[in-house]
């Protein structure tokens, strides 16, 4: 297989879980970000309420949900390897009417943690939406992306 081939397909183009057993164990770290964009009136309501809705403390619950999502990635994405995470940090910061949801995940393993970071940011964002949808269905989850990764064949993005 060439380096540009899809690794999750075998020679017959059937899905497969990649065998990573021969890869060296290295420290793997990845950070992903999603944005949750609120209509201005909803953002103001949330700020005035200290980000607490009748469902609870929005940012705190989303933080926990993001960690849970990262830890359960292999149960959600069929061909992901189950990983023993050594770190999962979720940071949610407000920037005007937008919540920036960052998820940083690390492990010592044979394969990277990009999917865990992306899943953590996604699940935290979905939790924010769920907790705030009574205020508006015009909340937008946007720009889910990998910011950085290190520890494998190729590093990506700015690592801190």
Image (tube, rainbow, N blue to C red):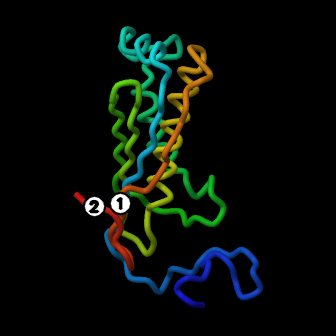
In-front residue for pair 58/33: 33
Q: Secondary structure at mark 1?
A: strand
> 23 above or below 15?
below
Task: Return the residue at label 1.
Answer: 148
What percent of the width, then of the height, locates residue 153? 39, 79
Q: Is residue 55 left or right of residue 60?
A: right
Q: Quadrant of the N terminus?
A: bottom right
Identify which residue is drawn at 48% across, 15% down: 42
Q: Quadrant of the C terminus?
A: bottom left
Q: How many neighbours does mark 1 have within 10 angstroms: few (below 14), some (14-19), or many (20 or more)?
A: some
- Picture quarter containing residue 156? bottom left
Asked whether the residues under the numbered discs 2 and 1 touch, taking CB atoms below 8 Å apart as contact, a structural biologist would say yes
What percent of the width, then of the height, locates residue 58? 45, 23
Mark 2 vs mark 1, CA separation in Å: 6 Å
Identify which residue is drawn at 45% across, 28% down: 61
Q: How many neighbours does mark 2 have within 10 angstroms: few (below 14), some (14-19), or many (20 or more)?
A: few
Identify which residue is drawn at 34% across, 71% down: 155
Residue extending farthest to the front is: 40
How many numbered tags mark residues here?
Answer: 2
In-front residue for pair 107/114: 114
Task: Return the residue at label 2.
Answer: 158
């Amino acid at each position: 297989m060439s380096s540009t081939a899809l690794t999750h397909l075998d020679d017959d183009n059937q899905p497969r879980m990649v065998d990573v057993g021969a890869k060296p164990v290295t420290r793997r770290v990845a950070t992903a970000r999603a944005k949750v964009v609120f209509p201005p009136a909803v953002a103001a309501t949330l700020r005035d309420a200290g980000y607490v809705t009748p469902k609870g403390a929005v940012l705190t619950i989303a933080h926990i949900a993001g960690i849970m999502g990262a830890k359960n990635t292999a149960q959600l994405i069929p061909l992901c390897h189950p990983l023993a995470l050594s770190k999962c940090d979720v940071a949610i910061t407000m920037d005007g009417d937008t919540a920036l949801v960052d998820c940083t995940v690390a492990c010592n393993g044979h394969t990277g943690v990009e999917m865990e970071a992306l899943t953590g940011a996604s699940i935290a964002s979905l939790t924010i939406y769920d907790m705030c949808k009574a205020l508006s269905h015009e909340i937008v989850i946007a720009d889910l992306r990998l910011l950085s990764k290190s520890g494998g064949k190729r590093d990506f993005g700015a690592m801190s």
